[in-house]
Image (cartoon, grey):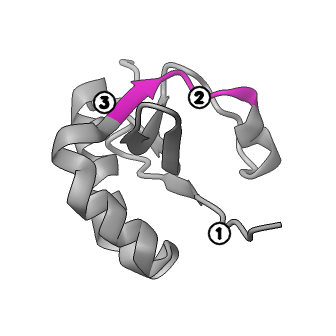
């Protein structure tokens, strides 16, 4: 018996970005959405890699690194990076899964 049918990392990264674009207006502040739309061509980044250990605090399934990809979406400014979403997405074509940790709204102190 063969293993699971997997999307490539590039394919799930594109899927994660499409999901981000669809859900961002409902999960980010209006200002964050405006900033992302204004600067994404010049300063935007999408990074994929192995899921980090933080995900075990948020999802109730075993995260096998070969079956999941972590995708980060943000803007890279000179003085700081702004991370808008941290996405965990499944590569398994027969077991779709996606969970997003959105940027929290920060209050001035």
Which stretch is magenta? Answer: 46-53
Q: Is 61 rendered above or below residue 65?
A: below
Gap in angstroms between the C-alphas marked 1 and 2: 23 Å
Residue ID for mark 2: 51
Residues at circles 1 and 2 in contact by the CB criterion of under 8 Å: no
Gap in angstroms between the C-alphas marked 2 and 3: 19 Å
Secondary structure, mark 2, is loop
- Residue 78 visible from this viewpoint: yes
Residue at image coords 38%, 78%: 25
Residue ID for mark 3: 5
> Which is closer to the viewer, label 1 or label 3?
1
Whichever of callouts 1 and 3 sits on the residue coming sooner in the sequence is 3
Residue farthest along the left direction in this orientation? 41
**Residue 101: quarter of image:** bottom right
Q: Residues within 10 Å of mark 3 (few under 14, many from 20)?
A: few
Measuring from the top left, give residue 67's x and y in whole percent. 48, 28
Residue ID for mark 1: 105
Whichever of callouts 1 and 2 sits on the residue coming sooner in the sequence is 2
């Amino acid at each position: 018996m063969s293993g699971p049918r997997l999307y490539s990392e590039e394919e799930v990264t594109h899927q994660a970005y499409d999901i981000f674009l669809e859900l961002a207006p409902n999960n980010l502040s209006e200002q964050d959405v405006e900033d992302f739309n204004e600067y994404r061509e010049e300063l935007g980044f999408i990074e994929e890699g192995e899921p980090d250990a933080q995900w075990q605090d948020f999802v109730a399934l075993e995260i096998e690194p070969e079956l999941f990809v972590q995708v980060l979406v943000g803007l890279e400014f000179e003085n700081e990076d702004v991370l808008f979403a941290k996405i965990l997405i499944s590569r398994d074509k027969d077991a779709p899964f996606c969970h997003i940790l959105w940027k929290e709204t920060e209050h001035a102190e």
